[in-house]
Amino acid sequence: MEISFIITVATIIFFASIVHGGIGFGFGMISTPLIALFTDIQTAITLIIIPTMLANIVSIVSEGNFFEAIKKFWFIILLMVIGSAIGTILLIFTNSDYFKLLLAFIIFVYLLQSTFNIRFSFVSKNPKLSTYVLGIVGGTMSGLTNIVAPLMIMYTMELNYSKKDTIQLSNLCFLFTKIGQLTIFLYFGTFTIQIFEVSMISVIAVAVGLFFGIKIKRKIDTKFYTKILKILLFIIASILVLTTI
């Protein structure tokens, strides 16, 4: 890989880590579409798999009560891992550029839901079925695009999860699905030495970015920070659509 591309990836990951440290989630939602602007979506996902795991671990530890969270959410996590495995295998054997459109669509859904505070009473009326949908469908979307935020937010909002539970659930699901995804990539030989080397460089960017993100979290107005993030996501998703079509 060219040095310029490695620097670009590290810079994107650094920025995504700042966002993640500031609001407790968002690493994949920022880094995946940005890196996908410069490469195919499978490469984008493999490049950030290890950095994503580090970002998730830091967020989980910072929230505390790891084992309690595992005990509470183990079934959803298991379903997500299964769904992610399905999505990852589809990604490996197809790796279509049209998955970038799916990625953009998921971002637009997230922006629509969060901006207009759309509620989905189906979740609260059918919590068991909703858990299966979140796990299998959300996991498959995560495997294909590295993003599951819209479904996760709808699910946790309707079931009145606390902010802490939402952050823990989101990060635990991503951590375990990334472990499963990495295993599948290794099995099929798509996680190469080159990608591993870039990932190791990116880990430094993650550590520094999370440090500054947590600092920012204590100082900046969260609403203003989130508004800027939404504008950025809208621009990224729009560029993904235009460059794919």
Image (tube, rainbow, N blue to C red):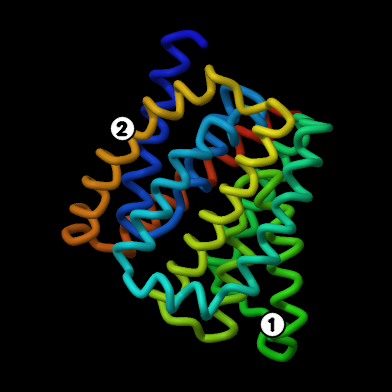
Q: Position of residue 94 (x, y in %)?
A: 83, 32
Residue lying at 76% horizontally and 33% vertically, measured from the top left: 92
Residue lying at 35% horizontally and 38% vertically, measured from the top left: 15
Identify the element where label 1 is drawn.
helix
In this picture, is 164 found above or below 97?
below
User: For this view, does 237 lie left or right of residue 141?
Assistant: left
Few, some or many residues within 10 Å of mark 2 (<14, 14–19, 20+):
some
To which residue does mark 2 refer? 204
Image quarter of the C terminus: top right
Question: Real-space Cα distance between discs 1 and 2?
Answer: 39 Å
Which picture quadrant has residue 162?
A: bottom left
Identify the element where label 2 is drawn.
helix
Residue lying at 51% horizontally and 78% vertically, measured from the top left: 71
Residue 164 — which label?
A: none
User: For this view, does 50 lie left or right of residue 107?
Assistant: left
Few, some or many residues within 10 Å of mark 1 (<14, 14–19, 20+):
many
Observer-nearest residue: 8 or 192? 192
Q: Are marks 1 and 2 in contact (CB under 8 Å)?
A: no
To which residue does mark 1 refer? 123
Q: Earlier in the sequence, mark 1 or mark 2?
A: 1
Residue at the outermost bottom position:
125
Residue type for callout 2: Ile
